Image (cartoon, rainbow, N blue to C red):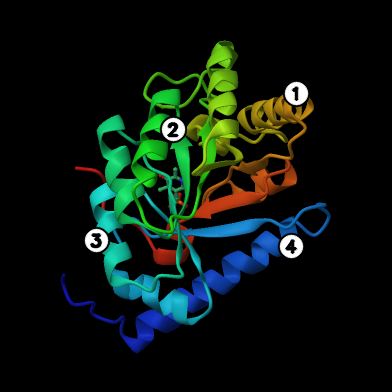
């Protein structure tokens, strides 16, 4: 296991200042909302020392996009961190996630029944395993490069929900979507994709008697998402700074 190098004191100050600013914006945007909005700090590509600095400031919920990177960080960092896996998930990697990370809090990028089955089976062999929270990712923009259930294939969503309800190690928490760039940068008052996620939540809540959470909103659109009813935002660059672009 590699040794964790702590953030410098100026980096710590920067991270805490950024986090506090984002948290304040989240609170301001949600002051009229009925439910508390959770802030997930998205730490992909950022060193474990950055995460530890925020952990020491009291932050517990972090989001990561890559299975290998998450497994490495989870092994080095405190075990009461609540990890959210938010990246594109290959079926073949479900086992690694469920087995290697006892403190995996949620997988937010579930887009098939098969992945739920794989998580359930692998979690079964972890001693004292806590259930994994599941968010179903919905492709609300219908973009072919995005993953997620399509709104025209709701049968697949129902099938997955039915499986999760009977699973021992999975817990349905909510729905997740990623706003498209065009929609986030537009000057319209409502983001249509967020609106679609809100309608789907209403439909599923009516069908299942649930109160699903909505994970929507990132650095550039979290305030808009909260206005439209988001109960969880995933913020990376506004907290940790820019990331290297995907080469
Ligand atoms: C990277 C990522 C984020 C955070 O993005 P920022 O724009 O840096 O806030 C949120 N959600 C998902 C699914 C991501 O991949």
Residue mark closest to the camera, 2 vs 3: 2
Q: Residue 72: which numbered mark, if any?
A: 3
* Mark 2 and mark 3: Cα distance apart in space: 23 Å
Upstream in sequence: badge 3 or badge 4: 4
Q: State how far apart marks 3 and 1 are (Cα).
A: 39 Å
Residue under the point 54% across and 12% down = 153
The reply to whether the C-beta atoms of the residues labelled 4 and 1 are less than 8 Å apart is: no
Q: Could you give the CA–CA distance between mark 3 and mark 4, rounded to whole angstroms? A: 35 Å
Comparing 30 with 187, the one in front is: 30
- Residue 207: assigned label: 1
* Residue 242 in view here: yes
Say which residue label 4 marks: 28
Which comes before the other along the chain, label 4 or label 2? 4
Report the residue at 58% width, 27% height from top.
161
At a point 82% along the width and 52% down the height, the residue shown is 34
* Residue bearing the label numbered 2: 116
Vertical relation: 190 (above or below) 155: below
**At which x and y percent is residue 9?**
36, 88
Q: Is mark 1 within 8 Å of ligand 1?
A: no
Tell me whether circle 2 and circle 3 mark residues in contact (CB < 8 Å).
no
* Drawn side of residue 27 relative to residue 6, left or right: right
């Amino acid at each position: 296991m590699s040794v964790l190098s702590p953030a410098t004191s100026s980096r710590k100050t920067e991270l805490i200042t950024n986090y506090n600013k984002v948290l304040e914006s989240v609170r301001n945007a949600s002051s009229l909302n009925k439910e508390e909005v959770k802030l997930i700090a998205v730490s992909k590509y950022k060193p474990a020392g950055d995460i530890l600095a925020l952990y020491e400031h009291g932050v517990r919920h972090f989001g990561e996009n890559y299975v290998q990177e998450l497994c490495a960080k989870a092994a080095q960092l405190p075990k009461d961190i609540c990890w959210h896996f938010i990246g594109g998930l290959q079926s073949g990697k479900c086992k690694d996630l469920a087995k290697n990370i006892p403190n995996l809090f949620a997988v937010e990028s579930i887009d098939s029944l098969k992945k739920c089955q794989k998580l359930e089976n692998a979690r079964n062999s972890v001693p004292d395993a806590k259930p994994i929270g599941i968010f179903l990712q919905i492709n609300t923009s219908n973009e072919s490069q995005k993953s997620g259930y399509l709104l025209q294939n709701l049968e697949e969503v129902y099938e997955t929900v039915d499986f999760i309800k009977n699973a021992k190690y999975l817990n349905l928490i909510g729905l997740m979507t990623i706003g498209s760039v065009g929609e986030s940068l537009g000057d319209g008052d409502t983001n249509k994709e967020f609106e679609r996620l809100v309608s789907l939540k209403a439909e599923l809540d009516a069908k299942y008697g649930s109160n699903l959470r909505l994970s929507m909103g990132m650095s550039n659109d979290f305030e808009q998402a909260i206005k439209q009813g988001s109960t969880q935002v995933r913020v990376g660059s506004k907290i940790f700074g820019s990331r290297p672009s995907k080469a």
